[in-house]
Amino acid sequence: MTITKTQRDILGSSALRPDGISKVQGDFAFSSDLHAENMLWGATLRSPHPYARIVSIDVSGAWKIAGVECVITAEDVPGQLTYGLISEDQPVFARDVVRYMGEPVAAVAADHPETCRRALAAIQVVYEVLTPLTNPEHAIDASHEPIHPDGNIIRRQRIMHGDPTATAPIVVEGTYDIGMQDQAFLGTESALAIPDHDGAGVEVFVATQWLHEDRKQMAKCLGMPEEKVRLVLGGVGGAFGAREDISLQVHTALLAMRTSRPVKMQYGREESFFGHVHRHPAQIWMRHHANTDGRIVKIEARFVFDGGAYSSTSSAVLINGVTHTQGPYQCPNAVVDGYAVRTNNPPCGAMRGFGVVQACFAHEGQMDKLAAATGIDEVEIRLRNIIHTGDTMITGQVLESVAPLERCIRETAAMPLPAEMGSHPHELDLPGGSGRTADRRNIVRGIGWGVSMKNLMYSEGFDDYSTARCTLTNGSVELKFATSEVGQGFVTLAPQIARSVLGVDNVTYDTIDTQIGSAGSTSASRQTWMSGGAVDGACRMVRERLFEHVGAVHNIDPLRLAIDDTDIIDTVGTLRISVQEASANFSVSETYEYHHRKTEDLDENGQGNCHVAFAFVAHRAVVDVDVELGLVKVVQIATAQDVGRVLNPMSVTGQIEGGIAQGLGLAVMEEIIVTNGIVRNPSFTDYLLPTALDAPQVVISMIEVPDPQAPMGAKGVGEAPCISVTPAIVAAIRNATGKSIDRCPVRPQDICF
Amino acid sequence: MSELEHYSLTVNGVERQVSDAWIGESLLYVLRERLGLPGSKGACEQGECGSCTVFVDNAAVCSCLVMAATAVGTQIATVEGLNDDGSLTDVQEAFITEGAVQCGFCTPGLVMAVHHLLDHNDSPNEQEIKEALSGNICRCTGYGRIFAAVDTVISVRKGVSS
Ligand code: FES
Ligand code: FES
């Protein structure tokens, strides 16, 4: 079969993925599919202990195994011994001490994965096991010795806003616990490193979110200039934050440099659980003071994010958490204290929603408590408090973004509810799904709400610019950018932008690598805005040059020219010429760097214009709960999301549905269980993910109010879907059961006992 | 390694020699690393995600759970063999046009699972579809567009046959 298209794939159309055909046929090259002549396999030896002193490492046993070509430990790291996104506190290999279960201690390269496994088993490490610090409160109260030279507190940030003594007649408080969630991308970490013939450089094909940042960290650890480390994006099987930090990059490159042979590393699923950071588990206390009409007067809060053994992005996650204390509501007074601490639990960092997921779970729990205490309904209490463009937030920052929050809530509320469950439902539609255990007589339906706002792009003064190049030759366009395509669809969007700006149809993109300036990370809902802005800017520069050319040829002021579909027209004359024809024998190339507006650090009272922009969303959840077995089936999620402008309806739908599934996972099933620093469920057998049977009906409204600050009026849509859906589902479970459940994921025992 | 084996497998109708292979290799590993067929993906190697789905004698199986040497004498079909001439099957086409592909890592396994379902049941109901696909994890899409793709194939096939 062949796919026939009837419209141009410009902005606003549901353009199809350019990599779709290769992906459905199985010949799209994921990083794990790459091969090189004479290639070796690499593998990592990891600590079985959460906290231990390394007494000795004896690698001689590994060297004795036929087929083993290289064994490396911390002693072999030629450059900086540690790395990190914000502070460089994480060892490439542990040297004297291991600080979490799964920390890398050594790596090998050999002719076969099985040889690697045997080599790892032959390495003798003697550990002196120490008592791990696993309770984040003990990191704060200093009752445990420092587990790292940098101490146990990664960052503390308070926010003091308005009158700290203010109070009001209605006071509600709660303590909320959010579990450790895994990104669980399907394509595990993998890389192929190919050393240069002269031994002075290395080329690395890797699945990552940010090529240039990886390169920077790798070059330091390899002790090489950055230009000797070339990164190419290997096909990426999902990311969701877990590829923001480097994992196997330095190990793979180092093994390749040492052996002068290509080396491929690929984590299995269990190793993947140890090989990347997770969503921070958090405990959040909040106390809301409100008037009897439901209006919030003051919020007090305390946040504790467990950052695990190394800092990763914990300090930025903390800032996102505390600055979103108020959620999408007005709040004149606030007293907030927040900590991100170091423990011997698994390191935590970026995951879709980045600190705001945790804050939202708490503030939405509070809104429902406020509704109950005032007797005002959940929708009305939210509407009474919503924030508007121009309002001052608890950081003192004025909200400049378009904020169609009232529409988000009202349109969600207006969506039809699902039909009541009949008396003889299909057993797969009952809670428990394929377990077929639930009993219709014990099933109670509940409805719950969640509303949120999420910052877009990086914060606190960080200039996370993006770069793109547009080359127009004979009516065809080639784009170049270093934007990581992780599945989100930037490779679909970028050509749409070029087609719209330039009136061409034939648009391709070059290899995604470090042979152009940085694009920043594929995270923080930022690539549509940032890399979209860069592609848009580059295409506009090319269009200007094309108009100059056409103007010169036809003796017309180029300012009179415009693109009309695939033609160039004289807006005040008669000239109409196709872009194809106008650009015959004409070639121009322009590079554009897009920067968002500047932001500032927070001061010691948490005041400052720290965020760039915000997006808003409302979720309503309908659940069926078997109250005897504690099983939950999410029946329907209704959502209206502030998207600015819809650039590709099918892509936006995919982001919304996918984000909702991840938020559902956090609400009712996904949690990395850690006891005493030991990870108990590092597999897809024990770490449960939503399947087709768990997918609820999703009803979507995309609220389009173009944001004048956004390059094409469009806000990033990646994170908003997964933020308030979790509290909405948990609220629905509370509504069904009458239990006050203040943790997620909700477990059967939270419902039954 | 000392304990190496030689055997042949019939993959997509072609007899393929496997030489100097360790006996412990899974069918997934042999397809991907020895026979140049990386379309089947490994995301758990534990039978939980369905990314590695292939047909062995027309049964959909997780190739990560099959020892390759035990598949001697069977007919193995992979995503690469769905259409010999490089064109798209109706399921593949619907996955693209309905937006069922994001990162695409789950896609080959899901394409195989959908073919298997619809080849055995031309008008599955909603529960049958969900149950048939519940062994294939997709982390990106939330499944909505995948269901849409299945529905499209069902109605197109009905339209063609009626
Ligand atoms: S890789 Fe075979 S089921 Fe996951
Ligand atoms: S599209 Fe990424 S896992 Fe399904």
Image: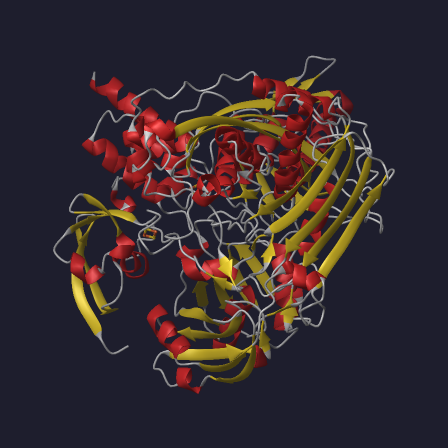
* Residue B160 position by quadrant: top left
Q: Is residue A447 left or right of residue A599?
A: left
- Residue A416 in the image: x percent, y percent? 49, 16
Q: How many marks on residues? A: 0
* Residue A346 position by quadrant: bottom right
Q: Nearer the viewer, residue B63 or A724?
A: A724
Which residue does the image show at 59% across and 41% down from the upper left?
A479
- Residue, far left: B73
- Residue A387 in the image: x percent, y percent? 74, 27
In the displayed structure, would residue A384 be above or below residue A726?
Answer: above
Q: Which quadrant: the N terminus of chain A?
A: top left
Q: Is residue A248 left or right of residue A175?
A: left
* Residue A369 position by quadrant: top right
Q: Nearer the viewer, residue A370 or B102?
A: A370
Which residue does the image show at 43% across and 27% down from the upper left?
A444
Residue B64 in view (yes/no): yes
